[in-house]
Image (tube, rainbow, N blue to C red):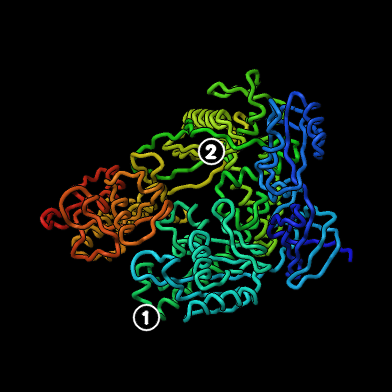
């Protein structure tokens, strides 16, 4: 039966049928029905040589399907030989085919077949596709043998079935180990309103979990730490019981794919821990912090990992309650983020689950690969080079102290705008270029470069969306989807410049990154000079923004000068009633005209300081900005000093969290968190790069690393209160008060008695 229809593309996979690769597109129609669109596909790679004719003759003699094509390499026109192969492993085939060829370059053999198919066809996961083909029935879903597949923008979203889960494991000591420690609980929630908790015999837990997956048939499975922990753990526990964890469609098991992501056939596996790890404001990347960061009002009765076994024995209902709260919160996170995640997916061409796991560099690269294919630009290999640092944006040292009525002028997309203005790109870099950067790199005026073209496309689309939003009800579904898309576009646009200086980039070009920042520094210096000529005082500047005082009646002329003379756009971003600057760059706090407080770079918003120090600094900042009274701010600080003197502080407020960024054997043993991490490993806990370790300073002699303990093994009697006074609370608060003339010893004075009399 012939069919033509439009579908939402969820995921793509390569399946080998009759010895040849076949593309499977997992789709949903507008009624939420599942379809698989199958299309035969022969992947290809390119060979570039100065003897194209000889290469063609040699390959044709081997009965290979080849064609001569016109392509570009970094903007340079070349003749290339396109070689088609009927195998999934194109890289191995390319090595075999080219091993006897001399003086050739090979391109695009290292791109995964599924990715190559998508970019060649211009298809976007989380976007629409129009399919023509032959419809056949299947037990689980409908199959279309496709004759034609094409991208369709702005398709109406399909209703998706969503399931969230959380698994709890029982370990008497250390981290749970799948070869040893059983599953004691799996909690499940679905978008249809089902809530299920599975306990009892472990084998039955796994079997019931699989039955629920089969019955609910979710399109999306949502978890937290599911890529890093849960899926592999569940698969091993199933194997021990002689079962297979067939949670994918067609009774398939999960498998680890690119970027550390676990792929589940026919379903999107979304792990919000991947997103949480990209948010620097989070102290510990837990679901609780993530939910709070998103502004979702939700309460958790937290049971920490080290408490689970004991709590399960004494009060299993508490563990069950917490686990159920997790799966319900995961559904709320999905509802809050689905539009943004799917928009980022469609923009970059990466499936919605991959796009969260991938770094910003890979997201930008995937977007650029689509553009490269449309522009006949060959996609280069990843470079094999070491990191080389370069000078970034200009940050002017601030005037320390409290300042009134400060306006922040922000350049709109400064780096993308400069790249467009000066045609900065890897393919316009030239010794005879007309545009000369302040650090003497030259770029041709014409033709338009690959990167400026990409940026213009992004900027134009974002502006079109913003215009459409002006005429929509912002609470409508269309407006929410469009708003999410323009945010996704902004993320990718602002990351293009940094991508060129990333050593993992296929289009790595350090000169592009260096030239862009040098022009950026020049813009800021010229703007500072002009602002001062107009009679304004520049309190501070940071990369693409200026903090100005004495600006009344002068801003309009300043913004017009930026537009007319610099060819850039700038806008008033904020007006602070008061702003406090410390002596350090990128560390300040301000209160806006609507009484909203911004804190940037200070200990109050850093995850590697104790909660008591952060709270003390935050209260000091708030009091100072609201009252402009140094003595009132000093009182606020002393309140926390007194709390510590009285021991009126919960142990959780004393925990200092530090991240493990590399294997432990690469660290010296003198860092407190490394000492604690090694102790935990000896006790059976799993610690790996990316994890955070929490410790509390305890009394004792010697340096700090000799007197720290893991936070859940410390009693109040052991706490080194003096350390938290001097090195945490007082140090955090004096950073705010010292620029205003307050000495550390004044902070230590409570009433008429010095703090040292208490210690």
Q: Is residue 15 left or right of residue 739?
A: right
Residue 433 screen position, x and y as percent: 65, 21
| Mark 2 / mark 1, whichever is N-terminal | 1
Q: Is residue 108 above or below residue 348?
A: above
Residue sitting farthest toward the left = 757
Q: Nearer the viewer, residue 523 or 301?
A: 301
Position of the N terminus, as image quadrant, is bottom right
**Corner quadrant of residue 668:** top left
Number of the label disc, if any, that sits on residue 702 = none
Residue 641 screen position, x and y as percent: 22, 57
Q: Is residue 40 above or below residue 294?
A: above
Q: Can residue 591 be seen in the rendering of this structure?
A: no
Query: In the image, what residue occupies the spot 81% across and 40% down?
Result: 65
The residue pinned by badge 1 equals 315
Q: Nearer the viewer, residue 16 or 501?
A: 16
Residue 79 screen position, x and y as percent: 77, 29
Q: Is residue 383 left or right of residue 721?
A: right
Residue sitting farthest toward the right = 2
Q: Nearer the viewer, residue 526 or 655?
A: 655
**Corner quadrant of residue 614:** bottom left
Between disc 2 and disc 1, the foreground one is 1
The residue pinned by badge 2 equals 555
Query: In the image, what residue occupies the spot 75% across and 37% down?
Result: 375
């Amino acid at each position: 039966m012939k069919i033509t229809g439009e579908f939402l593309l969820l995921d793509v996979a390569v399946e080998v049928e009759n010895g040849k690769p076949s593309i499977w597109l997992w789709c949903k129609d507008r009624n939420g029905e599942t379809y698989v669109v199958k299309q035969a596909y022969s992947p290809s790679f390119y060979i570039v040589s100065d003897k194209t004719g000889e290469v063609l003759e040699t390959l044709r003699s081997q009965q290979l399907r080849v064609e001569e094509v016109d392509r570009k390499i970094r903007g340079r026109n070349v003749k290339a030989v396109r070689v088609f192969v009927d195998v999934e492993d194109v890289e191995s085939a390319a090595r075999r085919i080219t091993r006897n060829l001399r003086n050739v370059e090979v391109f695009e053999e290292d791109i995964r077949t599924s990715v190559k198919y998508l970019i060649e066809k211009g298809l976007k996961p989380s976007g629409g596709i129009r399919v023509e083909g032959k419809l056949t029935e299947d037990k689980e879903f409908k199959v279309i043998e496709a004759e034609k597949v094409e991208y369709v923008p702005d398709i109406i979203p399909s209703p998706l079935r969503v399931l969230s889960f959380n698994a709890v494991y029982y370990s008497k000591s250390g981290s749970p180990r799948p070869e040893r420690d059983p599953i004691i609980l799996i909690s499940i929630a679905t978008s249809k309103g089902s809530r299920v908790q599975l306990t009892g015999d472990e084998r039955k837990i796994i079997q019931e979990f699989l039955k629920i997956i089969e019955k609910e048939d979710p399109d999306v499975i949502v978890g937290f730490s599911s890529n890093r922990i849960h899926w592999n753990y569940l698969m091993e526990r199933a194997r021990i019981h002689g079962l297979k964890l067939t949670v994918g469609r067609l009774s398939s098991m999960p498998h680890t794919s690119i970027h550390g992501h676990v792929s589940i056939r026919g379903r999107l596996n979304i792990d919000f821990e991947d997103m949480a790890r990209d948010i620097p404001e989070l102290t510990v990347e837990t679901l609780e912090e993530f939910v709070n960061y998103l502004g979702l009002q939700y309460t958790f009765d937290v049971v920490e990992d080290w408490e689970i076994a004991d709590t399960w024995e004494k009060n299993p209902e508490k563990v069950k309650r917490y686990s159920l709260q997790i799966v319900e919160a995961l559904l709320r996170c999905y509802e809050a983020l689905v539009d943004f995640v799917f928009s980022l997916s469609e923009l970059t061409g990466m499936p919605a689950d991959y796009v969260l796991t991938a770094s910003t560099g890979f997201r930008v690269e995937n977007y650029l690969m689509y553009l490269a294919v449309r522009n006949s630009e060959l996609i280069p290999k990843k470079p094999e080079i070491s990191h080389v640092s370069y000078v970034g944006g200009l940050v002017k040292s601030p005037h320390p102290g409290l300042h009134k009525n400060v306006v922040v002028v922000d350049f709109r997309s400064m780096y993308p705008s400069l790249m467009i203005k000066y045609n900065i790109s890897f393919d316009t870099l030239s010794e005879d270029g007309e545009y000369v950067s302040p650090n003497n790199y030259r770029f041709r005026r014409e033709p338009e470069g690959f990167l400026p073209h990409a940026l213009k496309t992004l900027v134009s689309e974002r502006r079109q969306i913003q215009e459409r939003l002006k005429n929509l009800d912002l609470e409508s579904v269309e407006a929410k989807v469009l708003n999410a898309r323009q945010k996704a576009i902004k993320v990718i646009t602002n990351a293009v410049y940094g991508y060129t200086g990333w050593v993992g980039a296929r289009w790595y070009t350090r000169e592009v990154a260096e030239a862009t920042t040098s022009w950026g520094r020049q813009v800021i210096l010229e703007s500072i000079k002009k602002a001062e000529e107009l009679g304004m005082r520049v309190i501070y500047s940071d990369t693409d923004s200026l903090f100005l005082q004495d600006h009344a009646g002068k801003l309009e002329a300043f913004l017009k000068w930026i537009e007319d003379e610099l060819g850039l756009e700038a806008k008033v971003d904020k007006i602070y009633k008061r702003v406090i600057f410390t002596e350090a760059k990128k560390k300040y706090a301000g209160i806006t005209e609507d009484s909203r407080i911004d804190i940037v770079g200070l200990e109050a918003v850093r995850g590697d300081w104790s909660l008591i120090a952060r709270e003390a600094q935050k209260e000091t900042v708030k009091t100072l900005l609201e009252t402009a009274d140094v003595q009132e701010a000093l009182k606020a600080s002393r309140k926390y000093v007194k709390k510590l003197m009285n021991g009126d502080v919960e142990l959780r407020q004393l925990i200092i969290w530090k991240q493990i960024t590399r294997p432990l054997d690469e660290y010296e043993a003198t860092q407190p968190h490394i000492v604690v991490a090694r102790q935990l490993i000896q006790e059976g806990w799993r610690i790996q790069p990316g994890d955070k370790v929490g410790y509390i300073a305890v009394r004792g002699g010697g340096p700090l690393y000799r007197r720290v303990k893991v936070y859940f093994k410390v009693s109040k009697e052991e706490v080194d209160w003096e350390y938290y006074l001097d090195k945490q609370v007082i140090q955090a608060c004096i950073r705010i008060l010292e620029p205003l003339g307050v000495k550390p010893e004044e902070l230590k004075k409570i009433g008429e008695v010095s703090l040292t009399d208490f210690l």
